[in-house]
Structure formats: C-alpha cells, structure tokens
Image: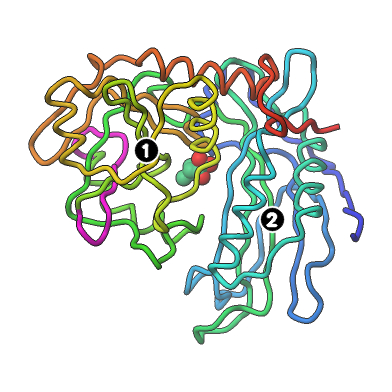
Amino acid sequence: MEAIRIEKTKNPKEKPGQDNPLVFGTIFTDHMFEMDYEKGKGWYDPRIVPYHPLSLDPSAMVFHYGQTMFEGLKAYKAEDGRILLFRPNKNIERANRSNRRLCIPEIPEDIFMEALKELVKTDADWIPTKPGTSLYIRPFVIATDPFLGVRPSDTYKFMIILSPVGPYYESGLDPVKIWIEDEYVRAVKGGIGEAKTGGNYAASLASQVKAHDEGYAQVLWLDGVHRKYIEEVGAMNIFFKINGTVVTPALNGSILAGVTRDSVIALCKEWNVPVEERQISVDEVIDAARTGAMEECFGSGTAAVVSPVGELRFEQEKMEIHGGRIGELTQKIYDTITGIQLGKIKGPEGWSVEVK
Ligand code: COI
C-alpha cells in the first residue's frame, strides 16, 4: 500500500468554542483526505492536505449523472483521552457495496481504514467533547471524467472531510414529528435505495420540503410498489415497539442497511427484548398507534444516533406516541450506544476502534 503523504496547513482555522451549538454539517476541520483513481492504474496518491475547494471540469460526470457514493461515521474522544471510531468496518463494507452498485471501483479496505485513522489523528484537536457532540466523518467518491455521455467514469476522486457536530435535529433528543409520505416514493427494489448515494437524497427533497412546511422534521417513506409498507425515514431507519416487541422493516433491497440499525438490533437481542425484522404495513402502524399498542417509536442513524419519534402524521391523522415523550427502551438504547461510542461502556467485539 502506498504510504499516505501528509501536508499540514500553514493557516489553521479558529476552532469553535465550547458554547458553539455545532449545527450539523456547518463547520469543517483544517485537513481533508484525497486519493485519485484512473482506469488501468487503480487508486493512487493517498494524501492528507489542507481543507480546500476543488477545481473540476464543468463536464465532470458527477455533476450530470450523479455517479457518487458517500458514507457517514463518527469519532469520539473518551474521558481518558482515547479517540474511538464506532464500527468503521461496517461503513467501509457498505461503501464498497454502494460502489459496486454504482459501478465505482472499490476502495481497498486497508487504505480506507488507514485514511480514516490518519485524518482523524491529524485533526484530533477538533473532536468536540461536550455531551451530544462528536466529529462527523464524511467519506465520498465522485466521478470526474470530463464527458457528457452516459457510462461509468474512468477517473474518480475519493475524499474524506470532517465536521464537529452537535445533534442532527434542532430538537436534540426531544422527540421529532414525522410525516408518513403517501405521494412521493424514495426507492424501489432493484433501484439504488440500498446504496448510499446522492440520488436517493435528491429524490427525497420535494417531500421533505412539504413535510417541513407542515411542521414535521422528516418523512417516513412507504414502499414504491404497494405504497403500503414502511421503509425508512429521510436520515434514519425506523423502529416501533408494539406490545413489547421491537419491529423494524427488513432489509428488502430498497432500504439502507444502517450501522446504527444493526447495533440497535444486536443490543435488543443481547437484552432478550423480542425484535423482528419484517414487513410492516402503515395500517399496522396506524392501528397500533390508535389502540395504544404502539409503546415507542424511534429512528436510528449515524447522524441522528437514536431519535425518539413523538408524533406520526398520516394523511389527516396525527398520532401521538408515548405522550410525545422519549420511551424507556429508546432512552436505554440511546444511553448504551452513546456510552459505547464514548468508551464508557464496553460494547461487543469490534464496535470500538481506537485511533492511535
Ligand atoms: C448519516 O446518518 O450519517 C447519514 O448519512 C444521514 C445523512 C443524510 C445526514
């Protein structure tokens, strides 16, 4: 493996103060990782360089046909000073699954891991330590051939940027209100719904704007064929606790395989909380909410961690969940996952990777 070259900035930025709310995705650190790809040559020149704007040909394929992949994971500073990544191997595996679906060349896992660690180490002073904060890591690939025909690009750029963040939602850990979407759809089986790529998020915007205008934080998608089965929320997977059982939609080919989703399921299993990954219809959700069988509802995601849902809205009906308050199991899952992320609780093997 080619060694990562490191060029440190000569103009370090001012870091956000302790009282900065660290609005998600607005502040970027001093450095970034970059690596290029050419057909026949492979990935080359891995480097950490000062954070900088890009210069790209306006015809670069990513701008026109959206051949791109992104990931999201977080680094934390433990009380004893250790720097911890939460399950980075899962993100690396998923990145390459997305790459395969989008005809982007795979990134060697060892280079990817090394790049994450070296970059986080370089900007370690940017990891915030206030409760509820972390250093969000955004790896992504773009197709760079200057060409307007539709085909996979022959050249790519892989980059990683870092952003100190607070909670994803303005409301923090207060329950969010979610709009169940019955007009637009996000993805269908066979499409790109299970890949982490910009197009899925572009497809979500019109619906998200509509939901925001009505006072809802995010959209809960129904499947694109029957318009009946629950899929996922804009930036999270979704869980319902119904009559003591935790239910989440099964990974069916159009849903994102969330790392936090996987972690929630593993914890429930460890605690002997019944958990089912299966098809769940909107009718079942509405019925459970109406009869009070719906005890809790929450979303899971890297950015959102575990976010309680206090209200679901479907057509004209508003359904309050758990009195609009966070449920006990949701709180326990949140505390456990953030405890593991911060190194306060020992998680399963491989969940915490130390950056040294
Ligand atoms: C993440 O949770 O990391 C995501 O990628 C969701 C993103 C849309 C903020």
Residue 146 lies in quadrant: bottom right
Judge by depth and name the residue closer to the eye, 355 or 276. 276
Residue at image location 17% in from the left, 20% down from the top = 292
Residue 266: percent from left, percent from top:
54, 31
Left or right: residue 191 versus residue 5 is left
Which quadrant would the C terminus be assigned to in this image? Answer: top right
Which stretch appears magenta?
213-227
Instruction: Tell me if mark 1 has few (under 14), some (14-19) or many (20+) residues whose alpha carbon lies within 10 angstroms of its own.
Output: many
Left or right: residue 257 versus residue 124 is left
- Of labels 1 and 2, earlier in sequence is 2
Left or right: residue 101 versus residue 274 is right
Which quadrant would the N terminus be assigned to in this image? Answer: bottom right
Residue at image location 49% in from the left, 68% down from the top = 66
Decide: is 40 above or below 117. below
Residue 303: percent from left, percent from top:
51, 35
Q: Secondary structure at mark 1?
A: strand
Instruction: Tell me if mark 2 has few (under 14), some (14-19) or many (20+) residues whose alpha carbon lies within 10 angstroms of its own.
Output: many
Instruction: Tell me the distance, in whole angstroms, between the alpha carbons under discs 1 and 2.
Output: 32 Å
Residue marked by disc 1 = 248
Q: Secondary structure at mark 2?
A: strand
The residue most toward the left is 316
The type of residue carrying mark 1 is Thr
Judge by depth and name the residue closer to the eye, 58 or 11. 58
Residue marked by disc 2 = 159
Judge by depth and name the residue closer to the eye, 135 or 18. 135
The type of residue carrying mark 2 is Met
